[in-house]
Image: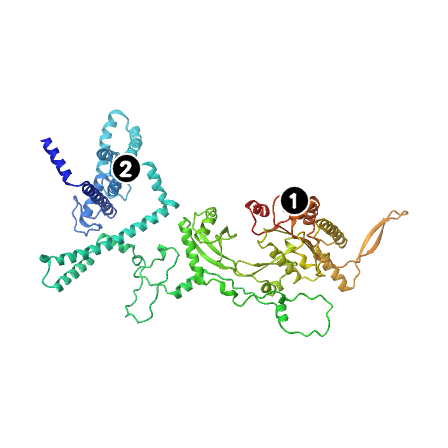
């Protein structure tokens, strides 16, 4: 008989192809797993919506059923809770895991062993819960472990009375049963410790991202299945209508019947449709439905495609009003914040544009005309980005940050002439170092040359600076003619350009008090030095400011040779540069002596005292002790007249420090160090530039006495750290 069965099975295997049998097995496994998972889910819903007033097998009532699954759900929930108690939830979780593994083609190895372990583990866990006191809100007469827990305790009670005292047995039994139940249930659930540890990350930062993708996949699966159901129903209708024996006499009756079926379907929604209704925003936020009006004829609106990533929060459903372009403009205007301060021409710029007749020759110094500088072209403002483009870039940047796991909001955009600043408010728990470390990746994703990221001081925000696609040229004429430069209270104003918001940036050299500049050839170092020199020439007269220029390359500063501000012709010989610096040191010492005679602390107090005496016609004097009286021994004092005049500021400009250090390194370093340490109060300031900021040129002594530094592009990271001290 067995041989006959074996031969029959082989015959069936020969008739059925292998791919068909594998297909049937996979579909059967999917069907069984889906059914098992659905049964566990339905049981869980029935337990969570169960109330003690619902009818059950041991309770008859005429009250309406409150369970979400109706009368069957009430019976199922009551039976599970009566039998297992709270342990029923653990049973449903394990059954759902089994169904999930079967539906995903993983299968359950050693099923009968895991089932036996599940029965033992549930019994032990029910006993543990039965030992615990039930809270007052527990509605059942049995404990938290249900009837199975009571049975386990009864058997353990008989065992304890015969062997161990009761006071000692129950605490030990609780710990032992709990220690045995947890590993057994873990083994029955087909999960490992590593899988549980990975699942725990769902509540962390990385897990939330995975949960978002999982929710999106589930939503996509739901809508795709609903669309597939509609298509299959349509095809089934067409197929039945094509069959001769299924065709009705009247097509209108057929259509009416299908319409009636649709109405019945809408009156009795399924669980999936209820879930879809819960997912709609209209379920949570009640909105007024707009009145339906006939479509008006008009121009066809072409769709606009954006490169920005799609955000789930920005998706609009059918019952949400579509945003108009005017609303997009308003939202863009709220986030984009342009500088409200405009550059206005000063009084000097207005007077120079008006014709003036010179009736007499002025003997005072005349400042150079602003018209020597190039005016900005009329179309200079056309290169600026619009608010819509900035808003699109902000959304794109938010999408890039979301791709790297950085959650936050870009709440402000500050466009500038060269760089645009995006202010990011990160979500709680996001480290600033993590965002700063993504500078290269953000620049690559935004198709930018580079990106600079730093924390904005005093704010809960991180600044992300990205270069503009088209740079706006900053013209010197516009800044010199501005009221910011004309009304600046800086003693030695230096025009450095525009801020990131497009406002003029004017620094004070007297408060720096010395400036160190570094940059390779072509990086803009010479342009910056010439801008600083012109800033002094357009504001300071020769009586108020003197210059000493040292240019070893004989090309950069030679154009200034002959201006009245120079104390000496432009120095091009490194040997003469040492002499010029030593003369500056002696001038500093002389000025300190004169300030000591007047009892003032700096050059501003000295000049104010001298000008005040000159205005009053007062002769400055000083009482000096010349010796002692030989007869009385008393000190002898004489009054010394001080012939002092106001002292101008002296600015020493060194174009290339590396060439001087190669020729006379020790002498140059000593003079520069002494001037940098003491020359501030004497009104002597230095602007030093170099294209090779190595440690042999910018020594530690020089760098320690130059607190203000400007670095253009340099050749290496080491040079950048040398000049900036980072």
Q: Residue placed farthest to the right in the image?
A: 631
Number of residues whose C-alpha sits closer than 10 Å to that of mark 2, classed few (under 14), some (14–19) or many (20 or more): some
SS at mark 1 in the image: helix
User: Which quarter of the picture shows residue 21?
Assistant: top left
- Residue shown at the point (37%, 65%) measured from the top left: 324
In the image, is 394 to the left or to the right of 220? right
Most foreground residue, 611 or 343: 343
Residue 311 lies, in percent from the top left, at 37, 55
- Residue shown at the point (46%, 46%) measured from the top left: 434
Most foreground residue, 279 or 216: 216
- Residue shown at the point (10%, 59%) measured from the top left: 247
> What residue did someone put label 2 on?
190
Residue 200 lies, in percent from the top left, at 35, 41
Most foreground residue, 276 or 649: 649
SS at mark 2 in the image: loop
> Where is 600 relative to 95, above or below?
below
Residue 701 circle label? 1
């Amino acid at each position: 008989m067995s041989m006959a069965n074996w031969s029959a099975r082989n015959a069936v295997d020969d008739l059925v192809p292998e791919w068909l049998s594998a297909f049937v097995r996979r579909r059967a496994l999917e069907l069984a797993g889906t059914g098992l998972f659905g049964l566990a889910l339905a049981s869980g819903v029935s337990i969570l919506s169960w109330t003690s007033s619902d009818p059950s097998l041991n309770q008859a009532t005429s009250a309406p059923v409150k369970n979400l699954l109706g009368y069957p759900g009430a019976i199922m929930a009551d039976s599970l809770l009566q039998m297992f108690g709270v342990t029923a939830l653990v049973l449903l979780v394990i059954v759902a895991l089994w169904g999930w593994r079967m539906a995903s083609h993983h299968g359950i190895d050693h099923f009968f062993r895991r089932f036996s372990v599940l029965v033992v583990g549930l019994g032990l866990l029910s006993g543990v819960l039965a030992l615990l006191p039930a809270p007052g809100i527990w509605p059942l007469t049995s404990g938290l472990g249900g009837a199975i827990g009571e049975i386990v305790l009864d058997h353990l009670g008989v065992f304890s009375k015969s062997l161990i005292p009761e006071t000692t047995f129950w605490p030990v039994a609780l710990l032992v049963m709990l220690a045995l139940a947890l590993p057994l249930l873990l083994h029955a659930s087909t999960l490992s410790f590593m899988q549980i540890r990975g699942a725990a990350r769902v509540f962390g930062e990385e897990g939330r991202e995975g949960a978002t993708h999982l929710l999106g996949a589930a939503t996509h699966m739901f809508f795709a299945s609903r669309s597939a159901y509609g298509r299959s129903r349509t095809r089934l209708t067409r197929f039945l209508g094509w069959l001769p024996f299924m065709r009705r006499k009247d097509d209108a009756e057929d259509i009416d019947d299908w319409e009636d079926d649709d109405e019945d379907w809408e009156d009795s929604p399924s669980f999936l449709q209820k879930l879809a209704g819960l997912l709609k925003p209209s379920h949570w936020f009640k909105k007024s439905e707009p009145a339906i009006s006939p479509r008006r004829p008009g121009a066809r609106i072409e769709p606009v495609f954006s490169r920005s990533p799609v955000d789930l929060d920005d998706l609009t459903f059918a019952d949400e009003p579509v945003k108009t372009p005017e609303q997009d403009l308003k939202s863009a205007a709220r986030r984009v914040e342009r500088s409200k301060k405009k550059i206005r021409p000063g009084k000097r710029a207005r007077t120079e544009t008006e014709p003036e007749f010179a009736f007499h020759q002025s003997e005072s110094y005349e400042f150079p005309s602003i018209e020597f500088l190039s005016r900005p072209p009329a179309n200079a403002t056309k290169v600026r980005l619009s608010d819509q483009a900035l808003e699109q870039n902000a959304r794109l940047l938010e999408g890039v940050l979301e791709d790297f796991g950085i959650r936050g909001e870009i709440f402000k955009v500050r466009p500038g002439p060269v760089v645009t600043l995006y202010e990011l408010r990160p979500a709680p728990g996001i480290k600033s170092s993590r965002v700063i470390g993504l500078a290269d990746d953000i620049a690559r994703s935004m198709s930018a040359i580079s990106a600079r990221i730093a924390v904005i001081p005093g704010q809960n925000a991180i600044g992300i600076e990205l270069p503009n696609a088209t740079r706006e040229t900053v013209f010197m004429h516009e800044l010199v003619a501005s009221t910011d430069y004309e009304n600046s209270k800086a003693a030695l104003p230096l025009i450095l350009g525009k801020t990131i918001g497009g406002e003029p940036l004017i620094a004070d050299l007297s408060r720096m008090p010395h400036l160190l500049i570094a940059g390779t050839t072509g990086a803009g170092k010479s342009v910056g030095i010439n801008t600083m020199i012109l800033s002094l020439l357009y504001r300071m007269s020769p009586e108020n400011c003197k210059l000493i220029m040292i240019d070893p390359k004989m090309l950069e500063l030679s154009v200034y040779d002959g201006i009245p501000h120079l104390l000496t012709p432009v120095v091009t010989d490194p040997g003469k540069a040492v002499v010029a610096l030593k003369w500056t040191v002696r001038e500093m010492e002389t000025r300190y002596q004169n300030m000591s005679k007047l009892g003032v602390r700096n050059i501003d107090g000295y000049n104010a005292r001298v000008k005040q005496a000159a205005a009053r016609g007062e002769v400055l004097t000083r009482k000096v002790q010349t010796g002692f009286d030989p007869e009385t021994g008393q000190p002898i004092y004489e009054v010394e007249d001080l012939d002092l005049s106001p002292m101008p500021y002296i600015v020493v400009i060194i174009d290339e420090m590396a060439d001087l250090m190669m020729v006379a390194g020790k002498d140059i370093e000593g003079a520069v160090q002494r001037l940098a340490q003491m020359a501030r109060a004497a009104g002597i300031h230095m602007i030093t530039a170099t294209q090779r900021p190595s440690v042999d040129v910018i020594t530690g002594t020089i760098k320690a006495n130059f607190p203000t530094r400007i670095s253009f592009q340099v050749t290496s990271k080491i040079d950048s750290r040398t000049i900036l001290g980072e």
